[in-house]
Image: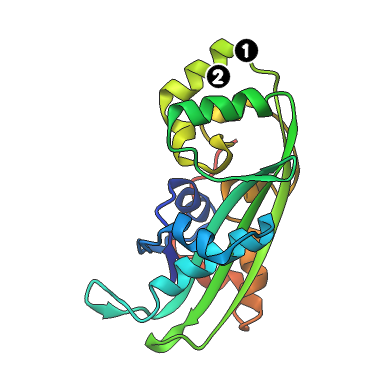
């Protein structure tokens, strides 16, 4: 069984690979800001669900290497919520720096939306979605640490301006809930979505993960 990942996120790809799945990558090419603006005010879970669905549906019916998609398509999106406000990718250093000055030493929610399309046989036959949320507590960073982190460029292209699987990991003191939600892809939720179609998780295993401890 093949899984097509409608995402360009290195973290989502790495998470799947570590779980024994080598997906087929398909860039969805979705204008996230335009989709969100057209929808109007949304809660965090509603927003990430909408964008995850938009990404998955953007590649349905397309060809990959000249062949129809035959398997499951997974779209995903994440947003960070603090004090009721939602934050996506900051894109610019000054925005990332401003966000870190606000969120350091505090706790927020990372919402990760998932939308799975059953595209077996070359056409969409059904879909299911879900959201995984985890609370994230940050260390009390110094101004120098924030400046150094922003200067790496890493926080510019990730929701909430932080990662848990790379340079930003040292600045997170606690995660409550599904840790994979913080990366942007909940493996346990994906398993549950596949079960809705009668597909067992081991049927996706197609690579040998590198295990170390």
- Decide if residue 50 is on the left or right side of residue 156: right
In the rendered image of this protein, does residue 132 appear above or below residue 39? above
In which quadrant is the C terminus drawn? top right
Residue 204 spot, x, y in % from top left: 51, 69
- Decide if residue 66 is on the left or right side of residue 56: left
Closer to the camera in the image, 199 or 178: 178
Residue 14 is marked as none
Residue indicated by mark 1: 142
In the rendered image of this protein, does residue 206 appear above or below residue 126? above
Tell me if label 2 and label 1 are in contact, CB under 8 Å: yes
Closer to the camera in the image, 9 or 43: 43
Residue 179 spot, x, y in % from top left: 68, 46
Q: Is residue 157 visible?
A: yes
Q: Quadrant of residue 198?
A: bottom right
Residue indicated by mark 2: 146
Residue 53 spot, x, y in % from top left: 53, 69
Q: Is residue 1 visible?
A: no
User: Which residue is found at the position 70% from the left and 18% from the top?
Assistant: 140
Query: What is the residue that sits farthest to the left in this orientation?
Result: 66
Q: Quadrant of residue 129?
A: bottom right
């Amino acid at each position: 069984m093949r899984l097509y990942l409608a995402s360009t996120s290195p973290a989502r790809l790495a998470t799947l690979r570590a779980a024994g799945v080598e997906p087929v990558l398909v860039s969805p090419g979705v204008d996230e800001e335009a989709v969100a603006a057209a929808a109007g005010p949304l809660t965090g879970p509603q927003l990430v669900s909408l964008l995850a669905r938009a990404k998955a549906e953007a590649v349905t019916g397309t060809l990959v290497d000249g062949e129809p998609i035959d398997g499951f398509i997974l779209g995903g999106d994440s947003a960070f919520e603090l004090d009721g406000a939602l934050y996506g990718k900051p894109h610019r250093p000054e925005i990332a720096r401003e966000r870190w000055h606000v969120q350091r030493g505090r706790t927020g929610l990372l919402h990760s939306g998932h939308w799975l399309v059953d595209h077996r046989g070359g056409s969409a036959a059904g879909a299911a979605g879900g959201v995984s949320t985890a609370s994230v507590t940050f260390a009390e960073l110094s101004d120098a640490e924030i400046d150094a982190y922003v200067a790496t460029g890493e926080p510019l292209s990730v929701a909430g301006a932080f990662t848990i699987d790379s340079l930003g990991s040292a600045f997170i003191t606690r995660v409550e809930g599904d840790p994979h939600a913080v990366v942007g892809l909940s493996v346990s939720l994906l398993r549950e979505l596949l079960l809705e179609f009668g597909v067992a998780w081991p049927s996706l295993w197609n690579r040998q993960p590198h295990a170390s401890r």
